[in-house]
Amino acid sequence: MTIQWFPGHMAKARREVTEKLKLVDIIFELVDARIPYSSRNPMIDEIIQHKPRLVLLNKADMADPEVTKEWIAYFSEKGIKALAINSQAGQGMREITQASQEILKEKFDRLRAKGVKPRAIRAMILGIPNAGKSTLINRLAKKNIAKTGNTPGVTKAQQWIKVGKEMELLDTPGILWPKFEDQEVGMKLAITGAIKDTILNLQDVTVYALRFLERVYPERLKERYKFSEIPEEIVEVFDHIGKLRGCLMGGGMVDYDKVAELVIREIRSEKFGPLSFERPRDIQLGKVDEK
């Protein structure tokens, strides 16, 4: 299965981001803590170039905490400040302002030395669809300003939002890239909900997810679906889950579509606990920056 999704408004958003870049001091690059590599848009590097940035690993509560620590250290080695946050619960919000002030200290010191009065930090939030940008903005602003939704593609236009006296945020639509060179990236985005389910073959996505769980979190997979041993044949895995959970058609045949929907839903609703679908050691050295 080849996964692609590049609605027209995303191409427009890229142009608008490029035009607005000169208005901001710092970029907040929002990624999914479960897939920090796969949820980084390579176009963002091209667009923002040398603009200061802060990487925010959102949905950190859904990710394996030990792996998230590895990612924060990895970005630090690359000279990029990264924070683990949970915008839904409001965790890590204060640290965002503090980190921004640290990153921009030299710039604002120079402005003060020139007699320029202190002003609010101007930040642009960039990220792929469904990364939680609107929820983050609402948390920072402490009111419901930005539209939110559980499906990708809710934010379609830019808006400036004040966060107290210390910060102004420029919200932007989520931007995916036109072509996934690595189809594993597409699979991970699909599992975590960054791509609309309606354009996916969920059975293919579920096969990838089950094989990942078998390889990385085998005990959780066994416990969840009561496997004594996980079968080698994937159809046997589907059959076992389908019979266990009653995903059946007429005549007692297993409904593989229902099995796929069940597994993906349970992964996204944390029935397997916090999961990280990639870790720094899985990524070829330097690949995160060159993507």
Image (spheres, grey):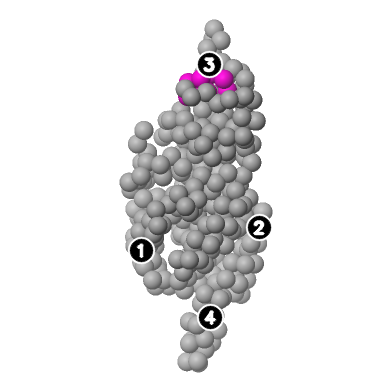
* Rendered image quadrant of residue 51: bottom left
Q: CA distance from mark 2 to mark 4?
A: 25 Å
Dot 3 crowding, Cα within 10 Å, few <14, some 14–19, many 20+: many
In the drawing, what numbered circle is on residue 65? none
In the drawing, what numbered circle is on residue 105? 4
Q: CA distance from mark 1 to mark 4?
A: 23 Å
Q: CA distance from mark 1 to mark 2?
A: 29 Å
Whether residue 73 is situated above or below residue 4 in the rendered picture: below
Which callout, 1 or 3, points at the residue further toward the start of the chain? Answer: 1
Q: Are marks 1 and 2 in contact (CB under 8 Å)?
A: no
Is any part of residue 290 visible from this angle?
A: yes
Dot 4 crowding, Cα within 10 Å, few <14, some 14–19, many 20+: few
> Which residue position holds label 1?
47
Q: Residue 275, position in %: x, y?
A: 58, 44
Instruction: Name the residue at 60% across, 53% down.
Output: 66
Query: Amino acid under label 4?
Result: Lys
Magenta span of residues: 234-242
Q: Residue furthest front?
A: 229
Which callout, 2 or 4, points at the residue further toward the start of the chain? Answer: 2
In the drawing, what numbered circle is on residue 90? 2
Query: Amino acid under label 2?
Result: Gly
In the drawing, what numbered circle is on residue 254? 3
Which callout, 3 or 2, points at the residue further toward the start of the chain? Answer: 2
Query: Amino acid under label 1?
Result: Ile
Instruction: Name the residue at 50% across, 82% down.
Output: 106
Q: Residue 136, position in %: x, y?
A: 58, 58
Which is closer to the viewer, label 3 or label 2? 3
Please, what secondary structure does the residue beneath circle 2 have?
A: loop
The quadrant of the image that shows the N terminus is top left
Q: Are marks 2 and 4 in contact (CB under 8 Å)?
A: no
Please, what secondary structure does the residue beneath circle 3 have?
A: loop
Which is closer to the viewer, label 1 or label 4? 4
